[in-house]
Amino acid sequence: MPTTLRNEAAIAGIGVTEFSKSSGVSELSLAAQCIKAACDDAGLDPSEVDGLVSYTLDSTDEIEVARAVGTGDLKLFSKINYGGGAAVGTILQAVMAVATGVAKHVVCWRAMNGRSGQRMGQGVSGNIVSSDLIHWSWYLPYGMLTPGSWIAMIANRYMRKYGATAEDLGRVAISQRNYAQTNKRSFFYGKPLTMEEYLASRIIAEPLRLYDFCQETDGGCAILITRRERARDLKQKPAVIRGVVQASTRGQEQMTSFYREELESLPEMELAARLVYEQSGLGPDDIDAACLYDAFTSEILMQLESFGFCGKGEGKDMVRDGALDIHGRLPNNTHGGLLSEGYIHGMNNIAEAARLIRGTSTNQPKSVHHVLVSSGVGVPTGAMVLGQD
Amino acid sequence: MSKPSRIKPALGKDNAWWWEQASQGVLAIQRCSSCKTLRHPPRPMCGACRSLEWDFVTASGKGRICSYTVLHHPQFPGYEYPLIIVLVDLEEGTRFTSQLVGCAPEDVDFDLPVEMVMHEDPDGFKLPVFKLAGAA
């Protein structure tokens, strides 16, 4: 049995549904569709799937999916907490399972009617008092009801301390919007963004504007994980998982880690970076492209620092240098990301990372050996590095 | 029909006492009975020494703005916009998330001194908010 997860597993299939503002179908239907698509992509019959992993926020149970898709016997079923923080965490479950022989073909999915159904940031209510509800009760009575309001508090402090400007956030939004122009799945396909339009967009939660926010989206995305050797038998070029980790640190809250001494960094993401580099035996210099979690533009600047692509406060300098663009140091979210393609809670960023390894992104940089993916920002999170077989 | 009111906190064993103090005009800070570490938001065990015993101190209500945001959209019933939310570094050493009242959005800034005032909604619900120090 392996004592490390390095290079043990691979992404063998990716599947997405259409992304829209109103899917007209149930979330179970979206889940079934994207899982079937991931199996088709890999050339694997769904009856060979024996593990299913999703988010606690996903409304669909594994057994519902199993019946709908016609999977085989399930030997692993698991859901990961903390919203988008679960993205890479689902993959970790799958990798541990296939590396240890617990399961052979595990599909991780997230399917949501994120616009037409339950939208994010609608507050919480109910009669059952949980520690989570008590947590939110420190914020909801004051009117802090949305992810934007929570992230803005950190972004404001960060930007003031390091002199990052609205234009710097705009550069992130525009870079990803540019990528969306070649990706027909993108909500913003055919709708490029200028700095003038960005700056003219309305303020939502200072310092964040409309285009600093991701796209509420209906859609599903699934990722098929199997052992590296098994992936070689399947249809697609394997995207080998060099390292995959979860990370949560002291003073961690869900979106409101306001009580740490320093607010201008992401300690959980720094931990994820340390762990994923350690597991993969790689460092920032080895990473050629990234799919950093981007529910908000400010999160990209901060993560460039967390993952050691620059020093503290230098995220703004990297974006000013065009680092995130196709010919830059670190092409980032080449599908448009959560900001411009759609918000499938980070699962679609994992799919793009696999495309970058396969060489099939609609914005394929020249030479991609390793791609970094991160989970949600401001929550217990995770990170993964994909590499060539 | 009466005006919609703000979302009320869910009350459980770990936080109801704090809101009870607020209803009496007190901004409370939980304190470990064993190692005397102050902590906020309240929780049942001290993360420093693992004691389950605690009491609380009454905050002076004085502090400085550590960070802030001004919320414009979306606008929910029960709140007035633009809505200034502040993180306040209380002089006792803990940090508190609250609202800044009586201040124009363009006048809020980092590090400004603030003072707590106990706000009361028309339905009698009380919660601590802040104003700029010395402001009326």
Image (cartoon, coloured by chain):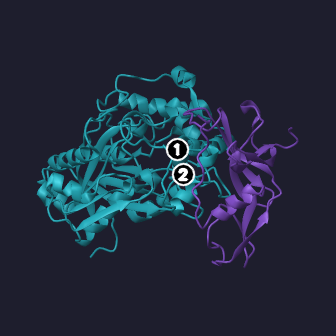
Amino acid type at image mark 2: Met
Tell me which residue sits at (29%, 62%) in the image: A94
Q: Toward which corner of the image does residue A206 lie, by quadrant?
A: top right
Q: Which residue is mark 2?
A: A255
Quick one: SS at disc 2? Answer: loop
Q: Residue furthest right?
A: B134
- Give the farthest residue toward the front: B1
Please identify the quarter of the rendering in which residue B123 is found: top right
Q: Where residue B92 appears, x then y in whole percent?
A: 79, 61
Whether residue A178 is visible: yes
Q: Amino acid at mark 1?
A: Pro
Would residue A189 appear left or right of A18 to someone viewing this image? right
In this rendering, is residue A8 above or below A39? below
Q: Which mark is residue A309?
A: none
- Pointer 1: what residue? A147
- The chain drawn cyan is chain what? A
Quarter that holds the C terminus of chain A: bottom left
Q: Position of residue A200 (x, y in %)?
A: 56, 22
Left or right, B123 with reference to A304? right
Q: Would residue A368 be seen by someone viewing this image from the given angle?
A: no
Q: CA distance from mark 1 to mark 2?
A: 7 Å
